[in-house]
Amino acid sequence: QVLVKGGKGLGRTGSYKVSATHADGWRAVTTLTLAAIDAPAKAERVADAILTRCRRIFRDKNLGDFRQVSTEVLGAEAAYGANARAQTREVVLKIGAAHDDRRALNIFAGEIAPMAISTAQGLTGFFAGRPKVQPVVRLFSFLQDKSATPVAVEVDGKDVPVTIAAKAVALEAPAAPQAESRDAGPDAVKVRLVDLAWGRSGDKGDIANIGILARKPEYLPYIRSALTEETVKDYFAHLCEGAVERFDLPGSHSLNFLLHESLGGGGIASVRIDPQGKGFAQMLLDIEIPVPAKMAARDKLGMTEGSGAQC
């Protein structure tokens, strides 16, 4: 059981938050397995061959180019970008594509099987079968004025008008305590963020959200000093095309990051392997944070191989 005291909300707003969707073209995703010497490079070459052939057919049929293409070699830490470490001989090639014309993606889907059995040595199969062409449904969120929005409740087939308090109520938020950043000093040693914090991530449209919760309150100033908006932006440079914002969460010893334009459209609009940013926190927990050597020695930071098991 958890007892929470003194919590206060803010006043109601004068608007509704609306999440609307609209049709925006077509998408298809396929996967191929490959076991070979230089498997990641071979997989990239196969993807290039498939896409090049499709584009040639598109030109012949005057269909235009793909609107979006995402090629990721799973098993070679494709999601990590420049932070990847793995060397492997067994990978899964994922190719995702979007197009304005469904006919173009039907051509793409039809090219996978012949290319899979007649290109690089080591392609072992396409177990997902022919990729299915699906509509892209894109999210658009906005605020709608309550006073301009009729509201009714249906009872026995009849609409019963309902009066809604549409006027915003302003309540002053209490002053937040000053957030502290602390330099680790000249004797600093670097440890992984996972040794200092827990992390969890998710999405809102095309925005990735990463929450970082310090394992001990005394760790937060060092995390905050190192984990700036610029640092996170650089770390996710291969995924984040927009701005990065950082927010302090007083009382919970935590930070929250918003990475704008980071999910390739997000949800079903994305053709990436992680359209909801579920792996972002796990990737960020590998970044190194400077801490005082005395603290690292006292808490045995970075000394336990399995420290990430509960992150």
Image: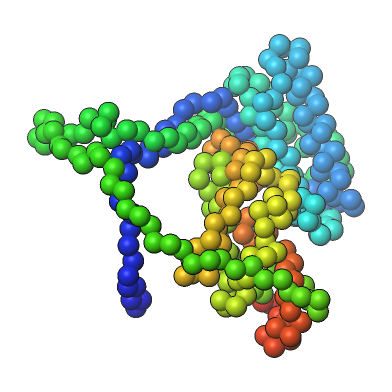
Which one is nearer the viewer's eye here, 70 or 130? 70
Task: Determine which quarter of the picture holds residue 290.
Answer: bottom right
- Residue for point 60% across, 31% down: 27
Q: Is residue 217 above or below residue 74?
A: below
Residue 138 locus on image (x, y percent)? 51, 32
Q: How was this image coloured?
A: rainbow
Residue 71 locus on image (x, y percent)? 73, 40
Which one is nearer the viewer's eye here, 208 or 171? 171
Which one is nearer the viewer's eye here, 202 or 157? 202
Point out the image quarter for the N terminus: bottom left
Point out the image quarter for the C terminus: bottom right
282 left or right, relative to 85: left
Task: Determine which quarter of the picture holds residue 3.
Answer: bottom left
- Residue for point 67% across, 44% down: 240
Q: Is residue 58 above or below residue 112?
A: above
Tell me if residue 187 can be seen. Answer: yes
- Residue for point 47% across, 70% down: 251
205 left or right, relative to 309: left
Residue, far right: 37
Q: What number of labels is visible?
A: 0
Tell me if residue 198 can be seen. Answer: no
170 left or right, relative to 42: left
Residue, far bottom: 298
- Residue for point 67% across, 61% down: 227
Residue 150 locus on image (x, y percent)? 22, 30
